[in-house]
Amino acid sequence: MSETDGRGSTSGATIRLENLTKRYPGNPNPSVDDVSMDIKAGETVVFVGPSGCGKSTTLKMINRLIEPTSGRIRIGDEDVTDMDPVKLRRKIGYAIQSSGLFPHMTVAENIALVPKMTGWSKAKVKDRVEEMLDLVGLDPREFHGRYPRQLSGGQQQRVGVARALAADPPVLLMDEPFGAVDPITRDHLQDELIRLQHELHKTIVFVTHDFDEAIKLGDRIAVLRERSHIAQFDTPEAILTNPTDDFVSGFVGAGAALKRLNLTRVRDVEIADFPTVSVDDPLQRIFNALRGGAGNELLMLDRRGRPYKWLRRGDLMRAKGSLARAGQLVHDTVTRDATLHDALEAVLTDSGGRVAVTGRRGEYIGVVDMETLMNSVHEMLEADRLAAAEHRHDLEELRHHRTEQELEGGADSP
């Protein structure tokens, strides 16, 4: 069903849907009608479409939470359409909105569920739980014994992803997994998924109604009409620059050039250094750093090296030398896997015109500022302008060539 990567973990498997159809009794029209699709091993494919178009139904047929009325499902070289559905689901990770964690089980027990069912040894399960928590950026010592009610929405979703990946499945199905959290947490969870996919190379099928999320996450996007008919199945770049029809254009919406900010990551632009101090530094050292720096601002880090406060020269004076009242708390950060769209939003909501970039545990890496982002926007708009001009030139040449052919044809006629 899958291959093993160099580290010994299971990488993705191909998925082939062949004429997949779902009919419900009493409904004259199928909910999903004759869908065929090939998904490559290790790629992230996003289903996006209007509410009720059948995208979640199609997803759930892959692990047979919903049984197809007709058609076949192949994962790797195996036809799983008639396989025992319980065995099948143990080989496919599944993450849903609001995490779906069992409230009476601890975080560790939730993550250990499928590995235990598949007969892993206690020692292997214990190691895997710790590995999974670390993988999704949660400290195993801190979160191992907690219950879901003791976690934030974002932490619950991270545990949900850890549980889905615990038995090392080649395929991960995700049904609007980040739809119930606030926008900032959602951005960070999306970044986390991108980072995980860089490491794990699973085959991910992801359902969303949010086209911006689809652009950010998908290697390819399937834009679905009603009954899961495929309007366009292509890369985000191709859909943004060349939508097949008005239905797809409606999903792209206005500002396609700016939406392309979702295709470029923070790691693709210059991350600048910024003067930093620690909360444990003596007050005099902080004063000296502010006085001696080229700018009039520095970033204070907490004891774990995470961005904590922006400090300006005047802040310490106005707060009469007390760090407790000085500075502005850091409300938003981005990771290297965040998109330039995320970074631009963060910069625009911050009076200082910059945003701190952090690692997987929230540790400080550097800063991205407005000038860097605006340069990237101008480069994209210029590229779009040149592409449009080239397209117009090609059309003009084509029309000119056809006119010449028609004239020649007219001259040859009797």
Image: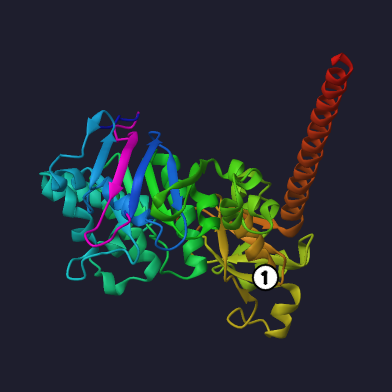
Would you say the magenta stretch is mainly helix, strand or loop?
A: loop
Q: Residue at x 79, y 29 (%)?
A: 398
- Report the side of 182 relative to 388 (left or right): left
Q: Which residue is mark 1?
A: 350
Q: Quadrant of the C terminus?
A: top right
In the displayed structure, would residue 388 be above or below residue 312?
above
| Secondary structure found at label 1 | loop
Q: Position of residue 283 (x, y in %)?
A: 63, 73
Residue type, label 1: Asp
Q: Residue at x 52, y 62 (%)?
A: 306
In the displayed structure, would residue 311 be above or below residue 178?
below
* Magenta span: 6-29
On whether residue 85 falls in the magenta region, the answer is no
Q: Assess disc 1: are there few (<14), some (14-19) or many (≥20) residues with their C-alpha within 10 Å of its C-alpha.
A: some
- Report the side of 127 relative to 406 (left or right): left
Which quadrant of the view contains residue 79? top left
In the displayed structure, would residue 304 be above or below residue 309?
above
Q: Position of residue 358 (x, y in %)?
A: 54, 56
Q: Quadrant of the N terminus?
A: top left
Residue 372 in sight in this render = yes
- Report the side of 307 relative to 176 (left or right): right
Which quadrant of the view contains residue 17? top left
Q: Residue at x 37, y 39 (%)?
A: 36
Q: Position of residue 108 (x, y in %)?
A: 22, 59
- The residue sitting at the front extreme is 414
